[in-house]
Amino acid sequence: MKKQFLDLGKQPIANKFLKEKISNEYFYQLGVAFDTDTCLITQTEYVDPPLMFNDSYVYRGSMSKTMVEHFKNLSKQFINKSILEIGSNDGVFIKNWNPKNVVAVEPCKNFAIETRDLGYTTYPNFWTTELSNTIKEKHGHQDIIFSANCICHIPDLDDTFKAVENLLTDNGVFIFEDPSLAGMINNNSYDQIYDEHPHIFSVIALDNILKRNGLEIIQVENLTVHGGSNRIYAMKIGNGLIDPSVEKNKSYERILGLDKFETFVRFAEKVKQSKEDLLRLLTQCKSENKKVISYGATSKSTTIFNYCGIGTDLIQYITDTTPEKQGKLSPGVHIPIVSPDHAFDESVDYAYLGAWNFIEEIRKKENNYLNQGGKFITHVPVVQVV
Ligand code: TYD
């Protein structure tokens, strides 16, 4: 049973950047709940996936050096295995592999065409049991099924895991990584919650849901990407040795109280406080005539700006390196997005870190800005100037 603990208000599609203001922009009510059966943190209602993942999807994994290196390092471990990737995006992971060993699945057709043109067999579909049957017939069972920042995008986890179980070899490994609930709670990063993230995973909840679909977690790796993620290794039940990292992570999560509804009631209070603090800081900057912009037109910042009611009165524009986002307006609050090439300069006093998860990469890159007295604002883990 879902018990709601947080209401993040009316939200637009987080990655739907607009060419111009439109009167019929789609909004939904973003409620967040604890599932008492599995301990899953999940939305009260899900946005229909084709509204988010279609041929105008703009998020590119390859836009960040951190992510390119991250996937290169993982790929080195699995030479000559057959691999299927769920949600292959612009090929940031599979580009490290020989196309003959890879089957890719990507419902955003713009990206599916891109990886197909690079020689990778790419199915332009959503991941379902039906698709896994088709792939099994054509390409056989797979040694590795990989997915990064995608499983938490899929509303129906039972079907997702059944489809994986169906396609894995008996010794096959399902490896997937998504932002971790422990990371979100520790960072107070409630902006991890938006339409594309209908769930935020704890190891406890995942193991509960995987087990009822014939899989179990055999290892957990804690990653620093995206503000704290977990890479989960799962196999068919009984087919792999269970590493101590599984129990270690579960017991840490129990210490954080991730298996208890009350923990999330307290989290909701902290979220409200974060909103008040951010509005206070931005309003103060405005009253001092400071130029405030935002750095990185992220989906996460869509949640923040729409929940807090932050528009062009408080943030003049957003810079982003993604060509597809430039020249557009941010969802819901319609802040213009521009290339940082000319807009991120010494005239900026404060830059709110929409892409706070890349803070180290950004700090290195924007050394000049910082040396000239420019400052960043973040809400992670508390609202502050850094
Ligand atoms: P990310 O935090 O991965 O996204 P989301 O919340 O949407 O899942 O996206 C990072 C965005 O920030 C992406 O649009 C690229 C942009 N970006 C910059 O503009 N400059 C940078 O230096 C970095 C690291 C990212």
Image (spheres, rainbow, N blue to C red):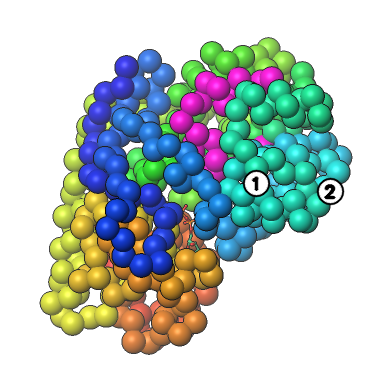
Write down the region rendered in magenta: 146-166
**Residue 229 in view (yes/no):** no
User: Which residue is the site of mark 2?
Assistant: 98
Q: Is residue 75 above or below residue 126?
A: below
- As measured in the structure, the alpha-carbon distance from the residue carrying label 1 to the one carrying label 2 is 14 Å
Choose top left, top right, bottom left or bottom right for residue 128.
Answer: top right
Amino acid on which disc 1 is placed = Ser
**Residue 355 in view (yes/no):** yes
Q: Are marks 1 and 2 in contact (CB under 8 Å)?
A: no
Q: Farthest left residue?
A: 287
The structure residue drawn at horizontal position 39% and vertical position 43%, both measured from the top left corner, is: 195
- 69 on left or right of 172: left
Whether residue 165 is in magenta: the answer is yes
The structure residue drawn at horizontal position 52% and vertical position 55%, both measured from the top left corner, is: 56
Q: Nearer the viewer, residue 310 or 358?
A: 310
Choose top left, top right, bottom left or bottom right for residue 151.
Answer: top right
Q: How many marks?
A: 2
Point out the image quarter for the C terminus.
bottom left
Q: Is residue 103 above or below residue 374?
A: above
In percent of width and height, residue 368 lies at 46, 83
Q: Main secondary structure of the magenta part?
A: helix
User: Which residue is the site of mark 1?
Assistant: 88
Choose top left, top right, bottom left or bottom right for residue 86.
Answer: top right
Identify the mark nearer the N-term, 1 or 2. Answer: 1
- 129 on left or right of 339: right
The structure residue drawn at horizontal position 69% and vertical position 33%, both measured from the top left corner, is: 145
